[in-house]
Image (spheres, rainbow, N blue to C red):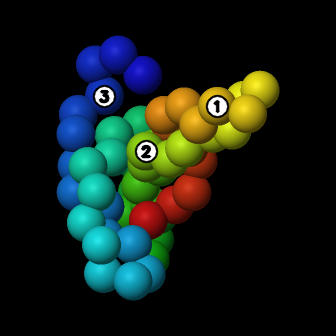
Amino acid sequence: MAGAPPITVVLPDDQEVTGLLLCRQQTPEGWLYKVSAPAWMNTDGQAEPAWFPGGVA
């Protein structure tokens, strides 16, 4: 994800987080954006920051 530009992602509950723009694609209906947003992952009983890939915003 190196080099991916940061973007503001607005979540359904109106929280704003800084995500990464992975790619964009133009379609006849408009633009689709693939973004990665920060999340937490539980590994071995420890909560660690991780990036949630995917999702189209």
Q: Which residue is mark 3?
A: 4
Question: How far across and down, in percent of the image, does residue 7 sit?
Answer: 22, 49
Residue 10 placement: quadrant: bottom left
Seen in the picture, residue 16 relative to 36 is either above or below; the reply is below
Seen in the picture, residue 46 relative to 28 is either above or below; the reply is above
Question: How far across and down, in percent of the image, does residue 2 sit?
Answer: 35, 16
Seen in the picture, residue 51 relative to 18 is either above or below; the reply is above
Q: Can residue 30 be seen at all in this image of the molecule? A: no
**Front position in the image: 24 or 7:** 7
Residue visible at 28% across and 19% down in the picture: 3
Horizontal arrangement in the rendering, residue 54 relative to residue 42 (left or right):
left
Three-letter amino acid code at the position of disc 1 = Gln
Quarter of the image where the N terminus is located? top left
Cα separation, mark 1 vs mark 2, equals 16 Å
Q: Which residue is mark 2?
A: 38
Q: Secondary structure at mark 3?
A: loop
- Asked if marks 1 and 2 touch (Cβ < 8 Å), the reply is no
Residue depth check, mark 3 versus mark 2: number of the one nearer the observer: 2
Q: Secondary structure at mark 2?
A: strand
Density class for disc 3 (Cα within 10 Å; few <14, some 14-19, many ≥20) is few
Residue visible at 46% across and 71% down in the picture: 28
- Asked if marks 3 and 2 touch (Cβ < 8 Å), the reply is no
Density class for disc 1 (Cα within 10 Å; few <14, some 14-19, many ≥20) is few
Residue 32 placement: quadrant: bottom left
Q: Can residue 41 be seen at all in this image of the molecule? A: yes
Q: Which residue is mark 1?
A: 46
Q: Earlier in the sequence, mark 3 or mark 2?
A: 3
